[in-house]
Amino acid sequence: MAKPKNAFYAQSGGVTAVINASACGVIETARKNKNKIGKVYAGHNGIIGALTEDLIDTSKEGARAIASLRHTPSGAFGSCRYKLKSLEENRAEYERLIEVFEAHNIGYFFYNGGGDSADTCLKISQLSETVGYPIQAIHVPKTVDNDLPITDNCPGFGSVAKYIAVSTREASFDVASMAKTSTKVFILEVMGRHAGWIAAAGGLASTEDCEIPIVILFPEITFDKKKFLAKTDRLVKKFGYCSVVVSEGVKNAKGKFLADQGLRDAFGHAQLGGVAPVVAGIVKEGLGLKYHWAVADYLQRAARHVASKSDVDQAYAMGKAAVELALAGKNAVMPIVVRKSDKPYRWSIGEASLNKVANVEKMMPRSYISRDGFGITPKCRAYLTPLIKGEDYPPYKNGLPRYIRLKNVAVKKILKPFKI
Amino acid sequence: MAKPKNAFYAQSGGVTAVINASACGVIETARKNKNKIGKVYAGHNGIIGALTEDLIDTSKEGARAIASLRHTPSGAFGSCRYKLKSLEENRAEYERLIEVFEAHNIGYFFYNGGGDSADTCLKISQLSETVGYPIQAIHVPKTVDNDLPITDNCPGFGSVAKYIAVSTREASFDVASMAKTSTKVFILEVMGRHAGWIAAAGGLASTEDCEIPIVILFPEITFDKKKFLAKTDRLVKKFGYCSVVVSEGVKNAKGKFLADQGLRDAFGHAQLGGVAPVVAGIVKEGLGLKYHWAVADYLQRAARHVASKSDVDQAYAMGKAAVELALAGKNAVMPIVVRKSDKPYRWSIGEASLNKVANVEKMMPRSYISRDGFGITPKCRAYLTPLIKGEDYPPYKNGLPRYIRLKNVAVKKILKPFKI
């Protein structure tokens, strides 16, 4: 009997609180099928590791270490922002990948990322046919931006959504307490340059049994200063305070990012500010109200301590399903979450063809944004609520979460170096 | 037998994740001593409520609602930033307080706040003697700044410290994954304008079994751009990345806040930026490294979802002890945390005379800051570690923490209005 083919797994793009849970799903499932899958090699720093033959031998990690990936945020093997060019532009890179796969007897390619990596995954599968070296390329969905099509949602998003919803509720309670003599408007800047999914999650902080005045500034809605100030003013007059959740991608009528104010310091040096302080300035100037602002940045996508259980479960399930799809002989596919019902949230696992996933962005439907453009609709709430459901706390030691750092033992290089 | 005197309780200054736990301790303990303490009236929006006779009758809240205060961040009765002037400057305000207390048969004054409120508390106790209306004034310590003297620490601080330590660890894991092709320096701005206690907590993210390169910028240490860049450069060269935790209060050699860069937008309008983007600009200009920055702002002090159990326990214990001190006939005192040992952390409750607390700020000892000024010493770690120990999660419903909003039923006004 031929030696079973090894698998390659890599993490791509911005990491999340649960991408390692997908890695855990891939590796644990591969380990349960040793007769069909040999070792799982991980790319050191994503696809770059495959190009430079920097492979990590995950078989050197104990079962407990691999299990700990499930509760560890970030990318355990390193990720990268490196988009492979098109086949026409840089065929050498694709051929190098095949060369590395062949040299290490790799027959399975699991690529864990967003839209760009789905595209890469598809191309590798196509090339493998052309060059006659068989590779099953399976994409494992991941992105906090929630912009992959077909799947109900993208692992990584639910936990960011939970973090933003929880933080908005907490900060709003704080502002409400202070509003009599101090801060009346709290502004939170969140990720999501193109799509407002994350900003929308701020709207979840307000529920029927816990109403909170929240203004959401979506990247989908052109910023209208006058309307924004009127809305904020109205809410502060009614509730005594209000919270603003602003997407980093909000643009003005000229299509320019609101964050891009051409800031200069006293010496004339350009300063890269966020959008939150810009909105704060608008509130101060327009309404004269005291404000506070926060920029969550990496904190939101790394916040494994308050991850959504739905999200962790689905991230793991996607990794597991990817291996199962490979074992079932599939190629150029991505496992997806299929929503069966909202309440209770029931989901199953399906699959999508990569040619239907690559280069397609799922935007927020307009029907998810309220008529005035500053809030979420019941439809949006019904969609989002299940995604933040459930808590899945990491273990703690001395007051800090116990996140795993793997040994990341390098596989011996066989090939000549390759320059990227 | 005379009707037992009522108690007045108020929250003062910036709220915290656990100030309501102290309120819970006060009210639950008072309820257990109904023969000695009548009702607990809370000041609506802090001491302002006492001046304007806006009192909240906490007896209208069920036992379950009061118990829920233990896991609810912010100030349930509203807080305020309102410092009473000195007795000489505004005797009328103090006399008004006595008038309100007398009108509502209040014999106990529990004031939950920081240094300023300790001072107010002391003055009320002094005045009560002068005017011959007996009030026992007990201060309940609270401040995220951890700057009250005598007590081992201040309730509110431990939970902020935990949030900053956890967030710094999580974001550092994120940066480490991205560093190969993207962000190499992550900058987190934290509170603490005068004292570096909160910034120091960022240092806890790195432990013996999980080393993380962290540069801390303390308000106690004059910012030295050259040294800072050299340190950051060294760490990035060694580890591939580094995290910077910067206190909002960091100043340059001229004694000017680093955050105050005289920013102007394209129209020449002043912009109030944080210190994190300033440090980011320095890193970019000085080292040419890719950075990300976050400003935690209210998120850090409202983050009840990741509160420290030590902190919650002590906040409750301080509220309980305040009532017990009152019942023991004490006046012008504050319950304190007395540290018995670091490892295991053992503490008991003591008391401090308010004249030793009022207007005294506890600064970070220089021995807690490493020689180069960018880190914490083992002594500091030994002090801080117990304060973030233990988790104390709030209950959740549909993915969100279930924080209580009280009914806050107003007590009928008897007196003429008072203008503040």
Image (spheres, coloured by chain):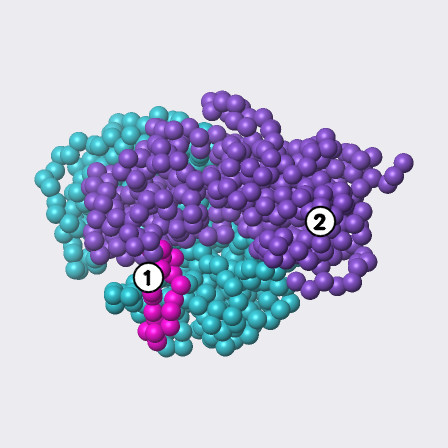
Chain colours: A cyan, B purple
The residue indicated by pointer 2 is B42
Residue at the image position 37 percent from the left and 34 percent from the top? B368
Q: Is residue B108 visible?
A: yes
Q: Secondary structure at mark 1?
A: loop
Q: Which percent across, then down, holds residue A405? A: 34, 33
Is B268 magenta? The answer is yes
- Camera-side residue of A234 and B410: B410
Considering only vertical position in the picture, is B238 above or below A254? Answer: above
The mark found on residue A173 in the picture is none
- The amino acid on which the numbered mark 1 sits, given as a three-letter code, is Gln
Q: Which percent across, then down, holds residue B289? A: 23, 52
Magenta residues, as a range? B257-274
The residue indicated by pointer 1 is B261
Q: Quadrant of residue B48?
A: bottom right
Q: Which percent across, then down, holds residue B277? A: 33, 57
Q: Which percent across, then down, holds residue B73? A: 59, 46
Q: Residue furthest left?
A: A416
- The amino acid on which the numbered mark 2 sits, given as a three-letter code, is Ala
Tell me which chain the residue with mark 1 is part of.
B
Q: Secondary structure at mark 2?
A: strand
Is disc 2 on the same chain as disc 1? yes
Q: Is residue B399 visible?
A: no
Q: Main secondary structure of the magenta part?
A: loop
Residue at the image position 54 percent from the left and 53 percent from the top? A171
Residue at the image position 68 percent from the left and 53 percent from the top? B94
- Camera-side residue of B128 and B107: B128
